[in-house]
Amino acid sequence: MSAPVTSRWWPLVLAATAMMMITMGIRQSLGLFVQPIAADTGLGIAAISFALAVGQFVWGAVQPVFGAIADQRGSGRVLVFGGMLLFTGMAAAPFFASEWGLLLTLGLISAAGAGAGSFSILIGSTARVIPAEKRSMASGVVNAGGSFGQFLYAPFATTVIGAFGWAAAAWAMAATALATLPLAWPLRRRKLPPAAPGAAVLPIADDDIGLRAQLRIALRDRSYWLLHLGFFTCGFHIAFLVTHLPTEIAMCGLSAGVSAMALSLIGLFNIVGSIGAGWLGQRYRMKWLLTAIYISRAVMILVYVLSPPTPTTFILFAIGLGMSWLATVPPTAGLVGKLFGPRYLATLFGLTLLSHQSGAFFGAWLGGVAVAKTGSYLWVWYADMALALLAAASNLPIREARLPARAPVAA
């Protein structure tokens, strides 16, 4: 008798979670490098922010491309290639510490490598072997790996930067990127599990229609575009904060330790938020979860703007942000899977991540422009609030089937 399905897919989820921990841990800690690079090289914050903003966009732009390759040829080679790119970009950054050099290493090479080992490929490769009713929870667990990586990498980067400089910290992160290579092996291509007897199959979820036909269907679907709009605003919010929150804290006269603690707390509490969102996605309609998450962000930003800039304020702000930080990923991926099935999830979710990172480009870049022009981030905070409310409104009309009523337990 073959092994139960659960005994086969949980090791894959754990491997994907570990890889997400590394790739996202490195990416989400780069904001800690802005001020050390500026002090060491004389580059302005706007120039460094632009390189990181390009990295945000590239990270999203490569995901549908790598996702399509993974859907067609398997995930293993994509993940290994991404790990090597991430290692190369981080290791080379200190040797090319100019505006164009940072654009090449942090903005292009390392960002592309992190994108090849991120959400769309990892969630897509695991979704093929996970029962439909478990995908939301599994996506939450994989997503939580990225949050745990941020929790680990932020204090690690701060400690190494403080003791040995930003170049040593970049090399240390490059070394950890090599750990993604063995994790790619269990995530190589696997066959889709057989459908359960009597399971309903939507026409748009037919695995045999081909990638091009599936893309045509998705791009004509209004709900899919509404997901893109909400995820665009999510990207603006995340990239602005991860890139500029350490600088905001420094401008308030607080130490780098407060910055590291804030980023770590965001990562730590997003573990709860991500797994919680995955769990709730199995019980409630995902568009309602997304609406609630985006509204909570607008409220938290308003409270932060009205509060005094003390360590306690930043700690509480980080805890609140952490609960919603990347909690949008499980319901967004889950909605894509509901609408179009798991066969081309890596490609279709990768396209939503491209929209997410288009917003991320503007969040990271305009934050630097705001400081250079006005000496403050205040107008970006107001824009972030407005975009969060827009994201909440855009999720309401999404077409999502109601969850089936649970059958009573037999006596």
Image (cartoon, rainbow, N blue to C red):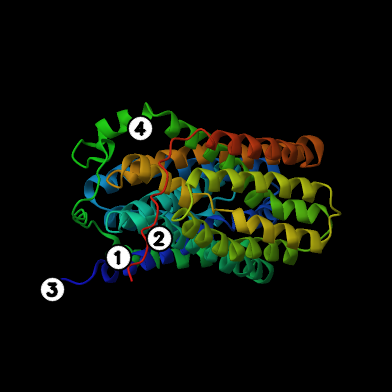
Please identify the quarter of the rendering in which residue 165 is found: bottom right
Q: Where is residue 202 in the image (x, y as percent from the top left)?
A: 27, 39
Please identify the quarter of the rendering in which residue 6 is found: bottom left
- Residue identified by numbered label 1: 9
Kindly identify the amino acid type of the residue bearing the numbered disc 1: Trp
Left or right of 294 on screen, residue 21: left
Marks 3,2: beta carbons within 8 A: no
How far is disc 1 from disc 2 in space, using C-alphas? 9 Å
- Label whose residue precedes the other's in the sequence (4 or 2): 2
Q: Where is residue 222 in the image (x, y as percent from the top left)?
A: 43, 28
- Label whose residue precedes the other's in the sequence (4 or 1): 1
As drawn, 83 above or below 305: below
Kindly identify the amino acid type of the residue bearing the numbered disc 2: Ala
**Count of numbered tags:** 4
Left or right of 386 on screen, residue 338: left
Looking at the image, can residue 189 be seen?
A: yes
- Residue identified by numbered label 2: 138
Kindly identify the amino acid type of the residue bearing the numbered disc 3: Met
- Label whose residue precedes the other's in the sequence (4 or 3): 3
Q: Say what secondary structure mark 1 lies in.
A: helix
Kindly identify the amino acid type of the residue bearing the numbered disc 4: Ala
- Residue identified by numbered label 3: 1
Q: Which of marks 3 and 2 is in front?
A: 3
Q: Say what secondary structure mark 2 lies in.
A: helix
Marks 1,2: beta carbons within 8 A: yes
How far is disc 4 from disc 2 in space, using C-alphas? 23 Å
- Label whose residue precedes the other's in the sequence (3 or 2): 3
Q: Which residue is drawn at 48% across and 64% down?
A: 145
- Residue identified by numbered label 4: 218
How far is disc 4 from disc 3 in space, using C-alphas? 39 Å
